[in-house]
């Protein structure tokens, strides 16, 4: 049997973890930046995990996958699930109702340790609408990555064990080869992905795996390294200095996890390389202090607690950046929460699992990795569970925590969904007219309804919960119908296409095409179809696809979208086409979409009878007016903005000369020349630039009036006027 390298105790690791955690919290609270401390957590967690599993392999015992996974999650999950449940309760008590849905789903993904993938989807999903800065579970991305690695790493060790036996080589050498391959592959992927899409790469497990692999490689080669006292002194302080300065020197939030992430990983490696024996003036004099070890016991709980406390405090105090005093309050609340979590949750769970629990802060056991461990902020490298009782206890703990977390998140979402559905149904009933709904009259037999809200009731005073209601605000994107069957851009093109049919023999067809603002205005078509019963609606939208000069011929999703729409128009000859002809700016003039006049000419050539209506874009803001109304009051001047100057008359004339019909609904979106978050008891915007589907539906009659003279075929009488 090959000689077993004894892992030994490295007290500096506990201090390194504590220092990294303090940097994470301080940078989150006062600097609104990323410190690089999380990268050290990831690195250290793999370092300790590999030391433990390698020692077992070199002793001739194959790593037990189930045992390795269960014992770590049994220690991580109790505190995590309690924090998730407590955060959900706080959100329901203190945050606006329109935020509940996104938070519930973040909780659900966090329980399953896949929050990082949800954040990636939300980052790249134009329609996701999640405000990451207000997400109380965003910090679970790193715990999710770590949890996924905790499942993968035992498999790599198991593969290394069996390969070593088959090849008759040392386990350590085989593992160096395996983790070296992981490091090289992941690092190359990380560098490329960071350059292509840094926001998504930041949360990607594959782009982060090299940081774990680096920790594993250091654990494998460390026993064979011999470093003199003078060099250890230099390396230790250099590592500490690099870690402390990382967040100040590097723009971590915009450059990680590519080349730049080598900085904190190297910092952690230098500190560990410098460890091994006490020195008189080395970094170990700081990192092995008893108070550092004492703080280390609370690091996992503090990491879990500090972010939701920060998010909730900022929302309740209505501040964007905490002052020194605010930050101290946040620190104090987070620290108190972490103490409660450790003493009321973590330690009782540890005792149930048969794990030794330190009785005094900063004692030797508090820092000993074989008894307490140091992964992430969780830093668990626990002692073995003695089967079968403790293994059964670990399995039961994981199952109970998983079930409890899913019940908390699922129950919260189910309750919110019920409230949201009721709010949506109430809004739809008002928009369609209660008498018509109650009498089940076909749309073609309905008289114009008296709406009196939104753009039909601008004189109404603001209300506390405007239509569609806070519980339904997440569903205010306008889209309906079945997926289109033909004349589509390639499948990999972003966006979508939907069709609805009224069933009426004399129904005309309207195509809304363009960017997300064309999509939002499609609610005019849906409302007109619902009230008149004689309009079919097709929506073909791709995010960000306005139509500037040259865009029609350009490669990519926007050119494909506009060309596909031309193909549809030429083949199907719809009666109406609606596009958005400008792009608004925050506190500036609208930018004319210079490609629209030429596109109109192409439409007229392909289908001379098709009426092309060109809408002016709606105003946009630096931040969401709805959020402003909730926080500062719906009639607060802070939430108002003047309308932009009129669109250049020369561009409007160019639209008309090409055969288009210009329509500007700004006076109804922003009555009296002022844009407000609420008009006629209806929320106007649901984010910083998109109108709610509910409000757009109240514009249907104004749209019909604006085009009536040039497009008399459009259904004219929808809402009754006094």
Image (spheres, rainbow, N blue to C red):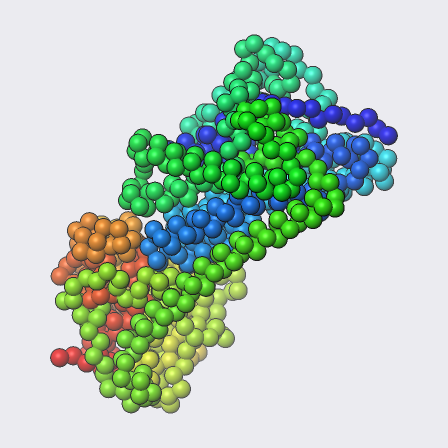
Q: Position of residue 190 (x, y in %)?
A: 56, 40
Measured from the top left, where is residue 475 in percent x and y? Answer: 38, 64
* Number of marks: 0
Res. 203 visible in picture: no
- Quick check: 445 left or right of 39? left
Q: Residue drawn 50% across and 47% down?
A: 82
Q: Which residue occupies the foreground of this view, 548 or 644?
A: 644
Nearer-the-camera pick, 465 or 652: 465
Q: Is residue 469 left or right of residue 573?
A: left
**Rendering quarter of residue 270:** top right
Residue 442 location (% of width, % of height): 33, 88
Q: If the image is split into quadrants, where does the N terminus sit?
A: top right
Q: Residue 253's quadrant in the figure?
A: top left
Q: Is residue 331 left or right of residue 295?
A: left
Q: Residue at x 44, y 78 (%)?
A: 571
Q: Image quarter for residue 548? A: bottom left
Asked if residue 444 is positioned above or below residue 559 in the image, the reply reads below
Q: Position of residue 385 (x, y in %)?
A: 70, 40
Give 484 or 1, whichever is nearer the viewer.
1
């Amino acid at each position: 049997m090959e000689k077993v390298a004894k892992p030994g105790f490295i007290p500096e690791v506990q201090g390194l973890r504590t220092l990294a955690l303090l940097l994470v919290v301080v940078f989150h609270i006062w600097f609104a930046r990323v410190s690089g401390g999380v990268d050290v957590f990831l690195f250290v967690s793999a370092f300790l995990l590999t030391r433990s599993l390698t020692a077992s392999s070199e002793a001739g015992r194959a790593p037990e996958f189930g045992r390795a996974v269960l014992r770590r999650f049994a220690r991580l999950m109790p505190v995590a699930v309690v924090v998730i449940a407590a955060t959900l309760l706080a959100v329901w008590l203190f945050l606006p109702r329109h935020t509940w849905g996104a938070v519930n789903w973040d909780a659900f993904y966090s329980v399953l340790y896949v929050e990082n993938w949800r954040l990636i989807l939300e980052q790249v999903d134009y329609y996701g609408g999640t405000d990451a800065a207000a997400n109380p579970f965003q910090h679970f991305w790193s715990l999710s990555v770590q949890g996924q690695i905790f499942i993968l790493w035992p498999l790599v060790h198991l593969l290394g064990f069996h390969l070593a036996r088959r090849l008759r080589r040392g386990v350590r050498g085989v593992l160096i080869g395996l983790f070296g391959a992981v490091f090289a592959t992941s690092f190359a992927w990380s560098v490329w992905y960071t350059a292509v899409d840094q926001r998504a790469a930041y949360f990607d497990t594959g782009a982060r795996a090299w940081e774990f692999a680096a920790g594993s490689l250091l654990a494998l080669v460390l026993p064979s390294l011999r470093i003199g006292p003078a060099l250890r002194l230099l390396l230790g302080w250099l590592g500490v200095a690099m870690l402390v300065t990382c967040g100040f020197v590097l723009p971590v939030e915009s450059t990680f996890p590519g080349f730049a992430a080598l900085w904190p990983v190297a910092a952690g490696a230098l500190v560990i390389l410098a460890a091994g024996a006490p020195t008189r003036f080395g970094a170990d004099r700081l990192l092995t202090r008893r108070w550092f070890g004492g703080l280390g016991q609370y690091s996992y709980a503090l990491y879990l607690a500090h972010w939701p406390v920060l998010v909730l405090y900022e929302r309740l105090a209505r501040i964007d950046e905490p002052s020194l005093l605010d930050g101290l309050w946040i620190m104090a609340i987070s620290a108190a929460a972490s103490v409660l979590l450790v003493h009321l949750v973590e330690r009782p769970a540890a005792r149930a699992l048969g794990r030794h629990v330190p009785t005094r802060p900063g004692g030797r056991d508090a820092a000993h990795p074989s008894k307490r461990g140091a992964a992430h902020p969780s830093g668990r490298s626990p002692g073995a569970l003695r089967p079968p009782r403790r293994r059964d206890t670990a399995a039961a703990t994981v199952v109970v925590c998983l079930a409890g977390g899913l019940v908390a998140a699922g129950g919260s979402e189910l309750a919110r969904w019920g409230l949201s559905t009721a709010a949506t149904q109430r809004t739809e009933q008002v928009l369609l007219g209660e008498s018509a709904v109650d009498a089940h009259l076909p749309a073609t037999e309905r008289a114009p309804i008296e709406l009196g809200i939104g753009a039909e009731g601008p004189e109404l005073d603001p209300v506390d919960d405007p239509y569609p209601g806070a519980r339904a605000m997440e569903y205010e994107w306008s889209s309906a119908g079945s997926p289109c069957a033909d004349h589509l851009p390639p499948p990999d093109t972003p966006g979508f296409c939907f069709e609805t049919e009224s069933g009426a023999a004399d129904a005309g067809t309207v195509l809304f095409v363009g960017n997300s603002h064309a999509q939002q205005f499609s609610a005019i078509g849906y409302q007109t179809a619902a009230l008149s019963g004689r309009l079919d609606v097709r929506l073909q939208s791709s995010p960000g696809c306005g139509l500037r000069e040259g865009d029609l011929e350009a490669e990519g999703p926007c050119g494909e979208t506009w060309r596909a729409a031309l193909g549809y128009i030429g083949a199907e000859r719809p009666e109406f086409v609606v596009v958005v002809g400008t792009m608004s700016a925050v506190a500036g003039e609208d930018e004319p979409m210079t490609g629209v006049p030429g596109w109109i000419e192409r439409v007229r050539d392909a289908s001379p009878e098709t009426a092309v209506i060109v809408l002016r874009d709606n105003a946009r803001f630096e931040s969401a007016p709805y959020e402003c109304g909730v926080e500062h009051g719906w009639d607060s001047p802070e939430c108002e903005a003047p309308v932009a100057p009129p669109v250049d008359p020369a561009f409007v004339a160019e639209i008309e000369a090409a055969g288009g019909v210009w329509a500007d609904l700004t006076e109804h979106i922003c009555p009296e020349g002022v844009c407000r978050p609420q008009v006629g008891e209806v929320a106007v915007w649901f984010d910083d630039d998109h109108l709610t589907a509910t409000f757009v539906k109240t514009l249907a009659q104004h749209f019909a009036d604006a085009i009536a003279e040039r497009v008399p075929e459009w259904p004219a009488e929808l809402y009754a006027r006094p």
